[in-house]
Image: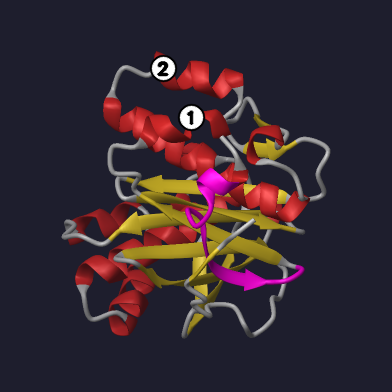
Amino acid sequence: MSPEETKGLLRIFCAWAPESIVGWIPDLLGKEEEFLPVLSREEQAQYWQLRNKRRRRSFLHGRLVLRLLAAHACGSTPSQVPLEVQSNGAPVLKGSPHFCSLAHTDWGAAAVLASVPVGIDIEYIQPRNPALARYFLSPSEWEQLQGLFPEVEVALLQGWTMKEAVLKAQQTGLRYSPRKLQIERIQEGKARVSGGINGSEWVVYFGRYEGHCWALAFQNKPVDSGVGTNIQKRFRY
């Protein structure tokens, strides 16, 4: 697939050059197979091995947004991006100075590239059982989040995405309990998270985009005040 055929698909919704750039692609609405040529041959084989259509679509969305974003940053074509997946499931751009992370929902996928360890999570906003909070939030964290977000589902999902972004950035996933992480000093669109692996601390930015809650975690790295700006532009090669 030529760059012309993928033009306008990737939306850059946050960018803080040269520190990081975040992209999103919406649901391809049944046109997934048209974009398979953007993937590597190995990824295309993986796609067809997935029997569940929902998992297949999610896989394609994730690989596609990361390849398009990396092509933008590295000056290559999407199919030539040296994307690999480590044994722990985390994506890596082989030979690139960029750290990367991706997340997907039923409605699209998001990816981030940065000059420091980074993680991204995004969740579609819909009713959730508030009792779930006790599995990953302390009582004080839950009280603080409810004070900031009137809608229970937003408070729950914003707390979850903050911690999940850190878990992805430190490449542990749920092998590291989210209750070990402590959300501190929550401000408008920004928080600090302590208690990471090996005592690491993280700066987390969060917000909403197209009906989703999203969060970005950077390892102890202040980022310019432009974080959270919703650019909503379409990337073009």
Going by the numbered disc 2, the residue's amino acid type is Trp
Measured as percent of width and height from the top left, residue 32 is found at 38, 34
Q: Is residue 203 left or right of residue 210?
A: right
Residues tagged 2 and 1 counted as in contact (Cβ below 8 A): no
Going by the numbered disc 1, the residue's amino acid type is Leu
Measured as percent of width and height from the top left, residue 83 is found at 67, 34
Q: Which of 148 and 131 is in front in this view?
A: 148
Q: What residue sits right under mark 2 in the picture?
A: 48
Asked which quadrant contains residue 33, the reply is top left
State the SS at label 1.
helix
The correct choice, above or below, for 37 with respect to 11 in the image is above
User: Which is in the foreground here, disc 2 or disc 1?
Assistant: 1
The residue drawn where x is 36% and y is 79% is 144
The residue drawn where x is 60% and y is 55% is 112
Instruction: Check residue 7 for magenta coloring.
Output: yes
Q: Measure the alpha-carbon separation of dots 2 and 1.
A: 10 Å
Tell me the crowding category of disc 2: few under 14, some 14 to 19, or many 20 or more residues within 10 angstroms, Cα based: few
Q: Is residue 126 left or right of residue 237?
A: left
The residue segment tinted magenta is 4-18
User: Can the viewer see residue 174?
Assistant: yes
Which quadrant would the N terminus be assigned to in this image?
Answer: top right
Measured as percent of width and height from the top left, residue 19 is found at 74, 67
Q: Which of 24 and 180 is in front in this view?
A: 24
The residue drawn where x is 69% and y is 76% is 223
The residue drawn where x is 62% and y is 70% is 15
